[in-house]
Image (cartoon, helix red, strand yellow):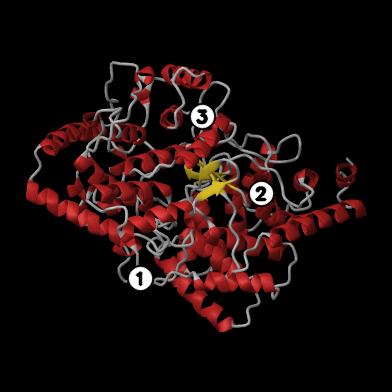
Amino acid sequence: MEITEALRHADSPKAAEATEQALLRGREHLLSLQDEAGWWRGELETNVTMDAEDLLLREFLGIREPESTRRAADWIRSQQRGDGSWAQFRGGPGNLSTSVEAYFALRLAGDPSDAAHMRAAGAFVREAGGIEKTRVFTRIWLALFGAWPWDRVPALPAELILLPPWFPLNAYDFACWARQTIVALSVVFSYRPCRRLPFELPELHLPPWSPPTPASLAGRGFIALDRALHLYQRRPLRRVREHALARAERWIVDRQEGDGSWGGIQPPWVYSLIALSLRGYPLDHPVMRRGIEGLEGFVVEDGTRRVEACQSPVWDTALAVVALSDAGLPADDDAMVRAADWLLDEQVMGRGDWAIRRPDLSPGGWAFEFANVNYPDIDDTAEVVLALRRVQHPDPERVRVAIERATAWLEGMQSSDGGWAAFDADNCSRLVGELPFCDFGEVTDPPSADVTAHILEMLAALHRSGAEPARRGLEWLLAAQEKDGSWLGRWGVNHVYGTGAAVPALIAAGVDPAAAPVRRAVRWLERRQNPDGGWGEDGRSYDDPGWIGRGQSTASQTAWALLALDAAGEGSAAAARRGVEWLVAAQRDDGSWDEPQHTGTGFPGDFYINYHLYRLVFPLMALGRCGR
């Protein structure tokens, strides 16, 4: 309470001292988390879908072990809500598909259907519409074990891989994460395997079942096409089918990463292992062995057992360098130099799928993960460049060359409308979203405000705001502002994240802080500030406009708002002072902050992420920039 009272007077010596102490505590805590190799990595927490599907994968491959099953089941049970369901994010509503997969995994682990927690889960599932209303991916897992008929899963022919990149609905029309998943699943769908279990799930069904009716003409057309493809599936052209399967198999194998993963993310990883198993790859085949062993590196063990959907060392390290710089750590500090050395070694110099649309562009980006040379991403690359510029490196020429390569790659990856997406350029097909198969998550990768903002901020730091790519990007970002003054957050929750990225980018790009777009954004942030002084936004804001800018205060979202206010020249205004007060008062004794909420986004409305390092790096940036 003493700190809080002091901070009510922002110009008081006690307030300045409290802020400085919070900054130093946070800085020391962040430094303590650095690996000797130079990187940082916080846990990337999602929901129990990852754990359920990991158990189901191991059952399918015949490698499920009793002890790991027990610990995974303990974790899944611990995440069950009071109404019997499982949610997609902390504090969110129960989700039908997540609950069905969790229930299925617990049955696999030995939980009887008449146990109290299982009865509660079953009641929730039936009330929400039963298995019949689950997403396609959930029904795929059920079909693998005979709990759902393959004929009631949308068709996905292996022949898809034979379509050239210029043809509609080819594999490269899908976003990279969807592309890797769909190619693998097209193999699985050709075999339609069924590994029956000693139990079924009649308690979760609500017959009769009927497929959803799309509202659009294109959607209805794809339903008719799906029926035709199901007929073809029964009697495919054998030579064409085998050629397609062989091509897909080679495509999958060629894209396995050095750590055994596919794209460093869970969905294509598990489906690729299943697909190759169906193609006859034994468990001791080098590709299968690397894939299975690599999964263990994504397991978090702390009494229970949970699985990360992905890992974010490049992203976390770049953010940590910027945060430490903002917190006053000298640019030539050993921690900064070691981080820069590690980042420089991680630059991707090979050509990946992005080159399909940009064949003449030289590589030079960074990926999100430890190993993902096929899919460097635009957002990470921008943040790494910003981080490298904060370091006084003993070999400045090495840094200069790396930044020049990255800049050329980033400018070349600009989409034709002037914005930047995460992984690809001009990946905006509307047709793929109409496919019956695509009912979960984003399946294309169009430009977003947050990624475009990060590129503009980076280009401004390189004094390239006057160049054509930056001018076009600025026009795109200004046009993307919402009527209320905010920006949508594609990769973070949600409008607080988008606005927290956009405003600093606009100012860096030369927009006057007094300009109307900036003032509208500031007013929006001021109106969304919570009574306690912080900011928060619930993941439901992607689906329900009533949640936009509303939610329990969190450290990362409060920091995003403060970064925007500081950039707009409002760092010492009342709203910012109250935000700093909230951060200082909420800090833990170890220098970090509690943040159980999922403030990161994988797929808006469908998949959310709790980056465990967000609660530390972003508050340090905010306190370093406007807390002083």
* Mark 1: amino acid: Leu
Q: Which residue corresponds to mark 2? A: 615
Compared with 392, 458 (above or below) is above
> Which of the two discs, 3 and 2, sits closer to the camera?
3
Nearer the observer, 288 or 309: 288
* Mark 3: amino acid: Trp
Q: Which residue corresponds to mark 3? A: 86
Compared with 247, 45 (above or below) is above
Nearer the observer, 528 or 196: 196
* Mark 2: amino acid: Arg
Q: Position of residue 23 (x, y in %)?
A: 78, 57
Is residue 215 toward the left or the right of residue 54 in the image?
left
Badge 3 or badge 2: first in the primary sequence: 3
Q: Position of residue 261 (x, y in %)?
A: 40, 56
Residue plotted at (48% across, 56% down): 475
Nearer the observer, 191 or 510: 191
The Cα atoms of the two marked residues, 1 and 2, are separated by 37 Å
Q: Which residue corresponds to mark 1? A: 361
Nearer the observer, 108 or 436: 108
Compared with 614, 466 (above or below) is below
Residue 389 seen in the current view: no
> Which of the two discs, 1 and 3, sits closer to the camera?
3
> Which of the two discs, 1 and 2, sits closer to the camera?
2
Is residue 622 toward the left or the right of residue 370 in the image?
right
Q: Position of residue 412 (x, y in %)?
A: 40, 67
The Cα atoms of the two marked residues, 3 and 2, are separated by 24 Å
Is residue 587 toward the left or the right of residue 139 in the image?
right
Residue 232 seen in the current view: yes
Would you call the spot at circle 1 few (<14 residues within 10 Å), some (14-19), or many (20 or more)? Answer: some
Residue plotted at (44% across, 67% down): 411
